């Protein structure tokens, strides 16, 4: 409302003899940096659908007079320079109160550095490289770290009596993290790493790499590729080169088996074990409600993945900040609310932002791909409760 409009409004109310004024309209601006286009555009779409669904179902809970405005920007993929420029514009030109989204670790790390200078809180909804939250006191993460999934999976794999593992990861920070974490969990359990390959981050041709894995004849191969089309492309190479028939077991982080790609994988994915933070098949009532709300809004064409759930939970955390500040976002107050924020009712189970590290504490599920009627699903069979980022446990911050 302009000053003139405001005065007129007050005058009109005074004339009507009303005792109370309506709350002043307040807009909280959230800048969303996500990948909406290009070969990995499905990832931003999932996160956006998840957070938009949260807004749709909870908008009524916002404090009276407070409006939420999302300003969406497309970083088009793992391009830190683009993400940094978008964050700069969102802060300087659009005057956002918070930044959120961020699929990719390099992008999140570039934005984290900026958030420390500009004092703008960032809610990371996917990027899982372990260092991100250490780069700025204004970053909180609602997704997971690669260490959270890969380290327990390494231990689980060794426990199966599988002795020789091969490692195949995407050649950038989260891939390197997952390699280190799986190796640590697997070797501590008595296993041995017999070889490793790293895939290019953009447009990899998996066939020559998978051939090398096949030639090495390990008992098991551990894989991290970013979720989205690459997951199905890797599985295609694994199937076509016949690794399963040769008896080479496959394990991976949840990124290899996102629900929206399972449909493109076919039966070769059956039996593949992964570590993840959410599965569509989970019978938790909160998960059933989430899936029902999703179907009602989006139909059955696009299925939700753990990224959509991180979008949902990230928006729940942003709502807590808006409610706790009544829409007057002070960056330090926002961070104080995010630190220790918890939700016992997330679709993935109880979650909490660790006040020490600003990373998320959550259950990690070991899942196996099974056929469920006409589609494949990740079925949870073991739960490691309330896992903190193991890397930060092992590498405490020097104060
Ligand atoms: C990341 O860049 O941190 C990242 C991207 C996609 C994933 C997981 C991690 O599936």
Image: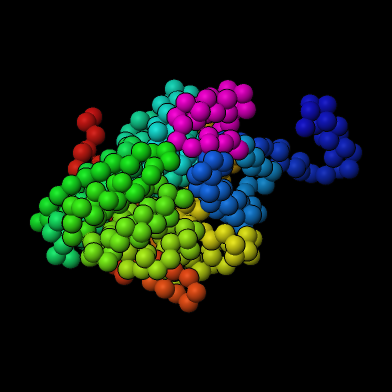
Residue drawn at x 49%, y 58% is 260
Q: How many marks?
A: 0
Q: Is residue 101 left or right of residue 254?
A: right
User: From the viewer's perspective, is 152 left or right of 19?
Assistant: left
Q: Quadrant of residue 270?
A: bottom left
- The x and y percentages for residue 89 are 57, 25
Residue 106 is situated, as x and y percent measured from the top left of the image, at 40, 33
x, y percent for residue 354: 34, 46
Query: Is residue 87 visible in this depiction of the protein?
Result: yes
Q: Position of residue 211 (x, y in %)?
A: 27, 51
Q: Magenta segment: does it hold 268?
A: no
The residue shown at (26%, 53%) is 222
Q: Which residues are magenta?
A: 72-97
Q: Which residue in the rendered view is the most extreme toward the bottom? A: 373
Considering every residue shown, the one lying at the far right of the view is 15
Q: Could you tell me if residue 356 is visible in this image?
A: no
| The C terminus, quarter of image | top left
Q: Quadrant of residue 113?
A: top left
Seen at 36% across and 36% down, the residue is: 132
Question: Where's the N terminus, which quadrant?
Answer: top right
The one nearer the camera, 19 or 21, is 21
How are the colours assigned in the image? Answer: rainbow
Q: Nearer the viewer, residue 296 or 226?
A: 226
């Amino acid at each position: 409302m302009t000053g003139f409009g405001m005065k007129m409004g007050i005058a009109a109310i005074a004339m009507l003899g009303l005792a109370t004024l309506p709350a002043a309209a307040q807009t909280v601006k959230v800048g969303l940096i996500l990948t909406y286009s290009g070969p990995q555009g499905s990832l931003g779409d999932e996160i956006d659908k998840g957070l938009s669904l949260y807004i749709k179902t909870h908008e009524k809970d916002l404090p009276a007079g407070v409006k939420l405005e999302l300003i969406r920007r497309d970083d088009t993929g793992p391009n830190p320079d683009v993400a940094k420029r978008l964050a700069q514009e969102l802060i300087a030109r659009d005057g956002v109160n918070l930044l959120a989204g961020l699929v990719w670790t390099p992008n999140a790390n570039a934005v984290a550095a900026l958030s420390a200078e500009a004092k703008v809180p960032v809610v990371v909804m996917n990027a899982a490289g372990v260092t991100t939250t250490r780069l700025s006191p204004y970053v909180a993460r609602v997704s997971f770290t690669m260490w959270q999934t890969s380290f327990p999976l390494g231990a689980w794999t060794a426990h199966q009596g599988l002795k020789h593992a091969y490692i195949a990861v995407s050649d950038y920070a989260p891939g390197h993290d997952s390699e280190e974490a799986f190796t640590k969990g697997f070797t501590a359990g008595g296993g041995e790493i017999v070889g490793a390959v790293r895939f290019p981050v953009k447009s990899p041709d998996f066939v020559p790499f998978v051939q090398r894995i096949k030639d090495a004849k390990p008992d098991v191969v551990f894989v991290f590729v970013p979720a989205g089309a690459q997951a199905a492309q890797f599985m295609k190479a694994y199937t076509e080169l016949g690794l399963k028939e040769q008896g080479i077991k496959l394990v991976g982080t949840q990124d290899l088996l996102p629900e929206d790609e399972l449909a493109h994988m076919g039966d070769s994915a059956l039996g593949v074990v992964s570590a993840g933070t959410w599965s569509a098949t989970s019978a938790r009532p909160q998960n059933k409600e989430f899936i029902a709300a999703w179907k009602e809004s989006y139909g059955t064409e696009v299925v939700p993945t753990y990224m959509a759930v991180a979008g949902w939970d990230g928006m729940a955390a942003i709502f807590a900040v808006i409610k706790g500040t009544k829409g007057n976002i002070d960056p330090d107050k926002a961070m104080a609310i995010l630190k220790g924020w918890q939700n016992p009712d997330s679709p993935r189970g109880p979650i909490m932002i660790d006040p020490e590290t600003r990373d998320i504490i959550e259950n990690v599920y070991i899942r196996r791909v099974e056929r469920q009627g006409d589609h494949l699903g990740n079925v949870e069979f073991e739960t490691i409760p309330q896992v903190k980022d193991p890397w930060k446990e092992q590498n405490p911050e020097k104060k």
